[in-house]
Image (cartoon, rainbow, N blue to C red):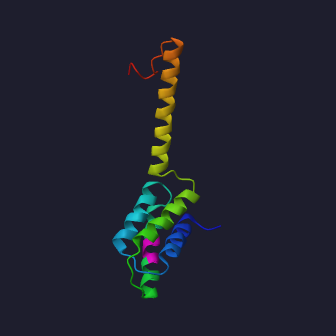
Amino acid sequence: MMSPREAVEQAIFVAVGAASLTRDRAQAIVDDLVRRGQLSDEEGRLTVDGLMARVRASGEQQGIIDKIEGGVHGLLRELGIAQRDDIADVDQRIAELEHRIRLLEEAAGTTPAAPADAGA
């Protein structure tokens, strides 16, 4: 089985297609994965170093950061990690459901119970 570091490196490299990658951008992507707990600090450092070595070896120069991010986002989806858009969609659905419940309670003439943390 592939380690998380190898999986991240493979996904990013495939998305890049052996094209140019700035060290700062690669570091930012990997730092985000370290913050999320998907990679250790050491795995993150090795991932960035490995990616930069592979990019230098390829010799190709292109600005395709969107492809890199797409690859990382795909990997995060594959690992089951929610992204901002996913969380925003769930928040919106919850707000809509809460609104519908309030309307139903008002129509039924009942008073909604105060939230458990209302007095905190």
Where residue 17 sits: x, y (%)? 50, 79
Residue at 51% across / 11% down in the picture? Answer: 109
Where residue 73 sits: x, y (%)? 49, 61
Where residue 88 sits: x, y (%)? 45, 44
Of residue 27 and residue 17, the one placed in the foreground of this image is 17
Residue 68 in which image quadrant: bottom left
Q: Is residue 75 above or below residue 85?
A: below
Write the start and end of the magenta stretch as one range: 46-51
Q: Which residue is most to the front?
A: 107
Q: State the count of labels.
A: 0
Quadrant of image for the N terminus: bottom right
Residue at 53% across / 62% down in the picture? Answer: 74
- Residue 47, magenta (yes or no): yes
Of residue 21 and residue 111, the one placed in the foreground of this image is 111
Magenta residues, dominant SS class: helix
Of residue 12 and residue 63, the one placed in the foreground of this image is 63
Where residue 28 sits: x, y (%)? 37, 64
Q: Is residue 34 above or below residue 67?
A: above
- Residue 93, magenta (yes or no): no
Residue at 52% across / 58% down in the picture? Answer: 76
Quadrant of image for the C terminus: top left
Residue at 46% across / 50% down in the picture? Answer: 85
Of residue 59 and residue 92, the one placed in the foreground of this image is 92
Q: Which residue is most to the right?
A: 1
| Left or right of 80 in this view: 36 | left
